[in-house]
Amino acid sequence: MLIAGFPAGAWGTNCYLVAPAAGEECVIIDPGHQAAEGVEETLRKHRLKPVAVVLTHGHIDHVASVVPVCGAHGVPAWIHPADRYMMSDPEKALGRSIGMPLMGELAVGEPDDVHELHDGAALKLAGLELTVRHAPGHTKGSVTFGLPEAAANAHDEGRPPVFFSGDLLFAGSIGRTDLPGGDMGEMLESLARVCLPLDDSTVVLSGHGPQTTIGRERAANPYLREVAAGQGDGGTAAPRRGM
C-alpha cells in the first residue's frame, strides 16, 4: 500500500494519493488550493496513474484543483450531492467575506465527469475499496473514506485500518461549524456514529494537520471525549481552524 500526502495552499490542506503500490493506478483525495503541481510531482515520483478524484467535502480549500487535475488526466470526480454546488459556487459555500477574495485566482466549476457519493457505498477504484460514510457537521455533504486493515503478505507488510477524515476529525480538534451548512449538533452526531466505532489502531489522515490514531483521539481529543462520555452537547467551544 502506498499513501503519499502533502499540504497545499493557503490553508495547508492535505491532499493524498493512494495506490496498492508504486507504479500502479491511484486515487487522489482532496486536490485543493494550489495542489495541482504537488499532485503531478507525486504522480511522477511514484509512477502512478490516477483513475479518480474523491472529495471529502466541497469547500474550495479541498476542491480548487479538481478541474485542472481531472482535466489533465481525463478522470472523474466523486462528491456528495449536498456539496456538489460548492464546486461551481464557492462564495455561497463560504460566505462573501471569505469567498470573494479568492474568486479571481481559482478555476471555479465542475470537471466534465462528476459522480455522487452516498453513505455506505464501497468505491472500488485503482484496486482499492474505499468505504464512504456521510458525516455532516462541517458541511451538509461531508464524507469520510475508510480502508480496511490489510494482513501482511509477500507484497505488503500489512497495515492497520486507515481513515481519511476530511474536516470531521483532526489531531486534537474537529472541523469548524460556523460556515454556511455547518451544524455543531450534526458534527457531534457524526463523531459518535462514524468515529467512535472505529478501532483504536485506525490511522487518521485528516484534511489539515498531522496524522493521528483513533485511540489517541479517543483519549485526548476534547470533542471525542465529550461524545464518548455522552456529554456531546457542544459544551466545548467550536473551533475556527482552517476553512
Image (cartoon, helix red, strand yellow):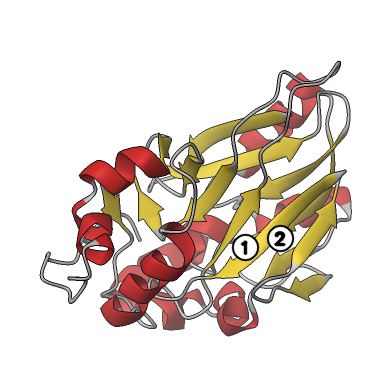
Q: Amino acid at mark 1?
A: Ala
Residue placed most toward the observer, 144 or 138: 144
Rendered view: 222 above or below 192: above
* Residue ID at (38%, 54%): 169
> Does residue 223 appear in the picture of this structure?
yes
Counting residues from the N terminus, which is met first, the one under dot 2 or under dot 1? Answer: 2
Q: Can you tell which mark lies on residue 107?
A: 1
Residue in the picture at 53% in, 77% down: 141
The reply to whether dot 2 and dot 1 touch (C-beta < 8 Å) is yes
Q: Secondary structure at mark 2?
A: helix
Q: Quadrant of residue 232?
A: bottom left
| Residue at x 47% of width, y 68% of height | 103
Residue 139 horizontal/vertical position (percent): 44, 75
Q: Residues within 10 Å of mark 2 (few under 14, many from 20)?
A: many
As rendered, which of 182 and 95 lies closer to the eye?
182
Of residue 15 and residue 137, the one placed in the foreground of this image is: 137
Q: Height in image: 9 above or below 75?
A: above
Where in the figure is residue 146, as x and y percent of width and height? 62, 52
Is residue 222 found left or right of 171 in the rendered image?
left
Give the labeled residue for mark 2: 67
